[in-house]
Amino acid sequence: MVRPKALPITGFAACNFDGVAIDLVHQFKRGGALELARFMSEPMAAALAGGDLRANWANEAGTVNVAAVPSRPDSFRRRGFVPARLLVRALVARLRRQGLDAREFTGVRLNRKVSDQALLNLQQRAANLAGAITVGPPPVPGTQLVLVDDVVTTGATIGEMYRAATESGWNCKFFVSFAETL
């Protein structure tokens, strides 16, 4: 399990973004192999449901909302789906089978146009996303919000999502991704 360090929130990635992981993500996102969401969610659920995270979850929250990073509208039109949202649905199903009260939270939105992050460096990615994500409605007391992305590259998206979530009053302690490059 990989633990990205460059973010304001504790997080876990199932693997490094190299070799087979690159192939899986490309088949999932570009090739439309949507069934891979179930496979990719397995180690993500293990990270969230195991050890210290499970203890924190049980002690502090009855319900944990799981939220996907948003996709740009043009990415959605091209693919026909939001990759992180499919991962969230598979992840929530796995967590519920493990006895955890997990629910998909769909209140994360882009509030303005952003550029494709693929060709941007760390600073450009952060500037591109600054203030671009909103999270609502406000949380029900006693709930947490777990952030989910398929691949964490620089952490800019998770960082912006964390900012928006905490400014909206969410208790946001963890993120999980399938792969990372940090």
Image (spheres, rainbow, N blue to C red):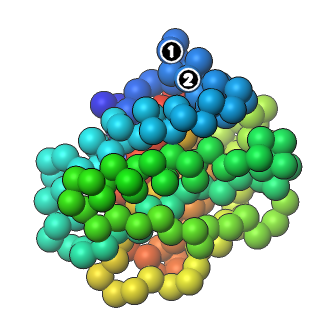
Q: Distance between the residues labelled 1 and 2?
A: 6 Å
Res 26 quadrant in image: top right
Of residues 155 and 33, the one nearer the viewer is 33
Label 2 SS = helix
In the picture of the structure, the residue carrying the numbered disc 2 is 24
In the picture of the structure, the residue carrying the numbered disc 1 is 20
**Residue appearing at x 45%, y 24% in the figure:** 16
CB atoms at circles 1 and 2 under 8 Å apart? yes
Of residues 81 and 142, the one nearer the viewer is 81
Look at the image and tell me in which quarter the N terminus lies: top left
- The outermost residue toward the top is 19
Question: Amino acid under label 2?
Answer: Leu
Label 1 SS = helix
Label 1 packing within 10 angstroms: few (<14), some (14-19), many (20+): few
Question: Amino acid under label 1?
Answer: Val
Label 2 packing within 10 angstroms: few (<14), some (14-19), many (20+): some
